[in-house]
Image (tube, rainbow, N blue to C red):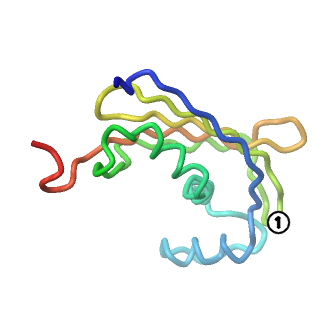
Amino acid sequence: MDFVGRRAEVRLSVTAEADAAAAFARATGAEPDPAGLPLTFPVAWLTRPEIAAMVASLAADRPEALPVHELQTIETIEAPVPGMDLDLTVRAIRTDADRITVEAEAMHAGRVWVRLTGILRLFDRAGSRP
């Protein structure tokens, strides 16, 4: 079965939690800003189980492969603030045998606030492929 060209989409609500943003800032060596989020914080939303399951479904033909970020961009149109609720739409496509492209938009009040794009490369773990 060929998985190249398969698409998936997930829609969910995310919140820019102040505690999570502060922990993220500290983990990256930055000082937390109670009034704002670290610029790269929206990446944390892509770790949600629903999104991990979507990626796994697109890589189901390679269950031992590990998806690793090959490219990632974050475009902040308007900076979300701590406590803000956003609607996140994540679309993914299996672009070739080794890659999944992920595109996401975080919206609030009908406007896009953040766009994320990532390319995940499927790396086989030792011994998983001939």
- Judging from the image, what secondary structure is the residue with disc 1 in? loop
Q: Where is residue 124 in the image (x, y as percent from the top left)?
A: 22, 48
Furthest-right residue in view? 109
Q: In this view, does 125 lie to the left or right of 43?
A: left
Q: Position of residue 129 (x, y in %)?
A: 15, 44
Is residue 41 placed above or below 63 in the rendered structure?
below
Is residue 7 placed above or below 15 in the rendered structure?
above
Classify the position of the N terminus by image quarter.
top left
Q: Position of residue 66 (x, y in %)?
A: 32, 52
Which residue appears at 71% of the width and 40% of the height?
Answer: 77
- Report which quarter residue 74 is drawn in: top right
9 vs 38, nearest the viewer: 9
Is residue 47 placed above or below 32 in the rendered structure?
above
Q: Mark 1 points at which residue?
A: 83
**Neighbours of disc 1 within 10 Å: few (<14), some (14-19), many (20+):** some
Classify the position of the C terminus by image quarter.
top left
Which residue appears at 39% of the width and 25% of the height?
Answer: 95
Q: What residue type is labelled 1?
A: Gly
Which residue appears at 69% of the width and 63% of the height?
Answer: 37
Q: In this view, does 21 lie to the left or right of 130?
A: right
Which residue appears at 74% of the width and 56% of the height?
Answer: 14
Furthest-left residue in view? 130
- Report which quarter residue 125 is drawn in: bottom left
Q: Is residue 69 left or right of residue 28?
A: left
108 vs 60, nearest the viewer: 60
Q: Where is residue 5 in the image (x, y as percent from the top left)?
A: 44, 21
3 vs 103, nearest the viewer: 3
